[in-house]
Image: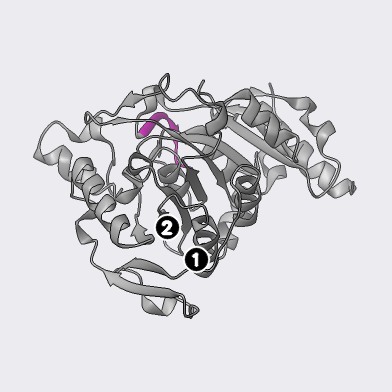
Amino acid sequence: MEIQRFQEYSLKTSLAMANLFQSVITVYPNCITTIHSEADYYMGVKQVPMIPDAFVSHLEQNGFHLHTIDKASHKGRGIDIDLKNPITGRFMTGSSSGTAVNVFYGINDLGVGTDGGGSVLSPAAALNLIGYIHPNLGSEWIDYVKYSKTSTDGISFIPSIGFISRDLDLVKQASSLFIADNLKKKKIKIAVDSEIDKNEWAEFDECITVETTNLVYKYEASRSELIHSLKQLLSDFDIVVSKEGPIDVYGIGETLFGHFDKQTRSIQIQGKKGFVRVVNMCNAVGLIVPSQELATGYLIIGRKYNFIEKYIFELAEKLISKQDSLIENYFLDYRSYFSEGYTF
């Protein structure tokens, strides 16, 4: 292993142990001994009982090594009042809040979280990261009856496991360990949010039909209305693409806060959480990738077919924006956090 990579991962562990951002529950410092090549990565896991040990072990056996247990928002809130969004300084989006923060700061290469009503997709988007959920991730090890929940607005659901990363290829690699990539050429229809500029789309082959759809209602609609809408869209289309955000920049996209009165409801709507709230509740596959705008992403939602993942990742590669060099230079300069030493 190159000495430069070893030094980089040593600094990642030092940053995790310092816990400067209050996003780490547990650190496994010996993780550095597992980094032998470019195919080894650090992984953080959300502090929830639903994520099976067998799921984590399978990832570890394939190069993703458990580095941290990450803080989650209390009782799965859509915001985490204990953590700050590193870019905006506002409340961090939940509930996989610490998992997203630890990926953002480079402590981990891959984060594993759970998503009931946007708890992976939303915090990922809030930090211009990549978020991915799939109903089949870890399904062979999960007792779904045990983990059935009810949202703050009264909707029953079962969470999905998901991934957060800066690197789309890493998400794709992790997903492939659990979801078979059986692409069979088939004609598919895609509904695209009218907010997405047509210039942002590359040419597609003849088996893909793209239709522009007005999704302007997505922020003001109730969750139950959105579930009905998305299920209808997915009965007519194989994939739906929605531009979401800016998440939790101008408002607080959280039901607990927004339920009081018209004023708090208005602030909740300005949190700009649209279909991210219901992808899991519709038993769909969801992948969100960052645009150039702050806390804004392209949400690609697919019906749970045995081939749809390939198309979802292909679309993501066409839509994803390059990582912001200013953000990288500012936040991923590990040595800057210890330039004047650190007292534990």
- Residue under numbered circle 2: 300
Percent coordinates x, y for residue 51 in the rendering: 54, 27
Q: Indicate whether 193 appears above or below 47.
A: below
Q: Residue at x 38, y 34 (%)?
A: 116
Which amino acid, by three-letter code, is at mark 2? Ile
Is residue 81 within the magenta segment?
Answer: yes
Label 1 near label 2: C-beta < 8 Å? yes
The front one of 149 and 69 is 149
The front one of 338 and 250 is 250
C-alpha span from label 2 to label 1: 8 Å
Quarter of the view holding residue 99: top right
Q: Secondary structure at mark 2?
A: strand
Q: In this image, 324 relative to 32: left or right?
A: left
Percent coordinates x, y for residue 61 in the rendering: 76, 35
- Give the crowd class for mark 2: few <14, some 14-19, many >=20 residues within 10 Å: many
Quarter of the view holding residue 190: bottom left
Q: Residue at x 52, y 57 (%)?
A: 307
Q: From which residue to which does the magenta span run?
A: 79-87
Type of secondary structure dominating the magenta stretch: strand
Percent coordinates x, y for residue 266 in the rendering: 16, 45
Q: Residue at x 84, y 42 (%)?
A: 6
Look at the image and name its color scheme.
Answer: one colour
- Residue under numbered circle 1: 315
Quarter of the view holding residue 324: bottom right
